[in-house]
Amino acid sequence: MVKSQFGEEKGNVYKPESRLATFIQAEFEKKKNEEAADYTDVQAFISALNSSTRSSNPAQWRSNLEATFHVDHYLKYLAVNNAIVNWDSYGAIAHNYYLYNHTQDKLTWIPWDHNEALSGNPGISGSVGSGAGGMGRNAVSLSMNEVSSTWPLLKYVAEDPTYLATYKSYLKSFKDNVFTESAMNALFEKYHSLISPYVVGANGEQGGYTYISSSTSFVNALAELKTHVSNRRALITSYVP
């Protein structure tokens, strides 16, 4: 996958279990170059992210961070993740992401495991200590104002005016060009029809071997997904007109 998506596969691949506030080697499982005890790439990233220059010299902080981490790519991911609502990710739990050290782009965020996406509707702002930022099973708000410094890769980009402006631009672009009701509804209907015969009915899932609570819940989920998109689009429009 790394070779096909990045055009190379030499760099370290990590599957972290880290909030990225401090470097603890045991929290960075290597998936490539496992026998090489070289973690300098991720150490440099965490050091740059948590540096005090964030307050004293924001421009230098951004420059140092971007020398170790593909920030723009991450901000684009973050906009999508917060738009669709996916609580089961960095901000609620310290996993479900990979990092690949690309030759030019440096450590690059790779999202993982989105089975909890497209549910819930956190607001534009949240209360401190609640939601995913407070270890709850809820996604963070669009502004991420409630997130504490225990999740620095959320907290610090949200507090930086330059990064926040970029995040907002990606959020608006995603809402206007990808996350539209017509496009999403067409996808929902297509795949609902595709799997329906194998979920409900004579050839559907059998009791004791399914997570579907009832045939009705599956049928109703189609309308629920469409409503979810409408609700999120309205909220995003209020945040970034």
Image: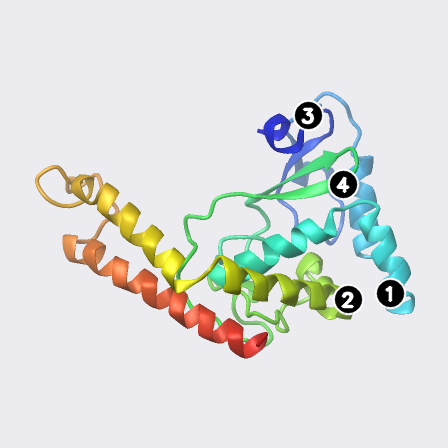
The residue to which callout 2 is attached is 162
Residue tagged 1: 58
SS class, disc 2: helix
* Mark closer to the chain start, 3 or 1: 3
The residue lying at 62 percent from left, 61 percent from top is 170
Q: Earlier in the sequence, mark 4 or mark 3?
A: 3
Q: Residue at x 86, y 54 (%)?
A: 63
Q: Residue furthest top?
A: 35
Secondary structure under the numbered disc 3 in the rendered image: loop
Q: Secondary structure at mark 4?
A: loop
How far, Cα to Cα, is label 4 from label 1? 21 Å
Q: Quadrant of residue 34?
A: top right
Labelled pair 3, 2 in contact (Cβ < 8 Å): no
- Where is residue 235 drawn, in percent x and y? 49, 75
The residue labelled by disc 4 is: 105
Residue 56 position by quadrant: bottom right
Q: Nearer the viewer, residue 26 or 40?
A: 40
- Foreground pick, 209 / 64: 64
Q: CA distance from mark 4 to mark 3?
A: 13 Å
According to the picture, the residue beneath numbered tag 3 turns out to be: 9
**N-term-proximal mark, 3 vs 2:** 3
Q: Nearer the viewer, residue 59 or 194?
A: 194
At label 1, the amino acid type is Pro
**Which quadrant holds residue 143?**
bottom right
Give the amino acid at mark 4.
Asp
Query: In which quadrant is the N terminus drawn?
Result: top right
Is residue 123 shown to the viewer in this render? no
Judge the density around disc 1: few (<14), some (14-19), many (≥20) Cα neighbours within 10 Å: some
